[in-house]
């Protein structure tokens, strides 16, 4: 399903260059037809297959032949990987926005986005109250909302800009 990958890639490139918009439109048409269980009539999939494998055939004929033979399977594998990486990135972004860490609530694992945290610009107000969750801190009134609050070892920490 090379058309899905082409739609994403050329759709993004089409934002910046007019040259790729026609290919993005072809890819959209191809994806729409494939989703409705019809054949792609634009020929985009065949053209991309020929371009990709043609270049490989010149350099390494065995690899080019393998890719030509299993092109549909390989494009499905790459499409699935693209979709999974988009979902996983969205999940990480949600966790970062919600909890301030890519890996979820109370995680101490490495997160590449931790450098984007604005916590150094915040003032922390800590109140020892015996809390067990952020919700308790908000209910008691030590924090304005859950996004700007931490509960660590029975201490409510309110972080305000």
Image: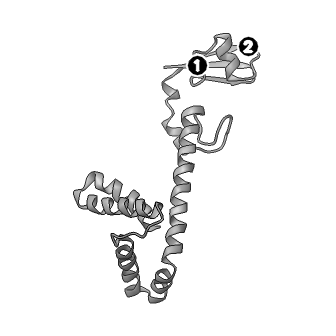
Residue 96 figure quarter: top right
Rendered location of residue 65, percent (x, y): 47, 86
Q: Between disc 2 and disc 1, whose residue precedes?
A: 2
Which residue was labeled with disc 1? Answer: 145
Identify the image's colour scheme: rainbow, by chain, secondary structure or one colour.
one colour
Residues packed near mark 2 inside 10 Å, few (<14), some (14 to 19) or many (20 plus): some
Residue 81 figure quarter: bottom right
User: Which residue lies at the image location 68% right of the left edge and 20% below the top edge?
Assistant: 135
Circle 2/circle 1 CB separation < 8 Å: no
Rendered location of residue 76, percent (x, y): 52, 68
Give the number of the mark in front: 2 or 1: 1
Q: Say how many tags the image has.
A: 2
For label 1, the SS is loop
Rendered location of residue 107, percent (x, y): 67, 39
Residues packed near mark 1 inside 10 Å, few (<14), some (14 to 19) or many (20 plus): some
Q: Which mark is residue 129?
A: 2
Rendered location of residue 73, percent (x, y): 54, 73
Left or right for 11, reference 142: left
For label 2, the SS is loop
Q: Going by the picture, which residue comes out furthest to the left?
A: 18
């Amino acid at each position: 399903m090379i058309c899905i990958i082409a739609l994403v890639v050329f759709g993004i490139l089409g934002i910046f260059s007019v040259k790729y918009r026609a290919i993005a439109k072809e890819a959209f048409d191809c994806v729409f037809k494939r989703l409705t269980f019809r054949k792609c009539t634009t020929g985009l999939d065949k053209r991309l297959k020929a371009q990709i494998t043609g270049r490989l055939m010149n350099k390494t004929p065995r690899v080019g032949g393998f890719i030509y033979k299993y092109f549909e399977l390989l494009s499905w594998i790459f499409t699935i990987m693209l979709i999974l990486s988009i979902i996983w990135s969205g999940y990480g972004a949600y966790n970062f926005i919600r909890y301030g860490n890519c890996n979820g609530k109370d995680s101490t694992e490495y997160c590449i986005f931790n450098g984007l945290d604005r916590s150094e610009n915040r003032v922390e107000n800590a109140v020892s109250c015996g809390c067990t969750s952020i919700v308790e801190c908000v209910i008691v009134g030590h924090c304005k909302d859950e996004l700007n609050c931490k509960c660590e070892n029975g201490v409510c920490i309110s972080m305000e800009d």
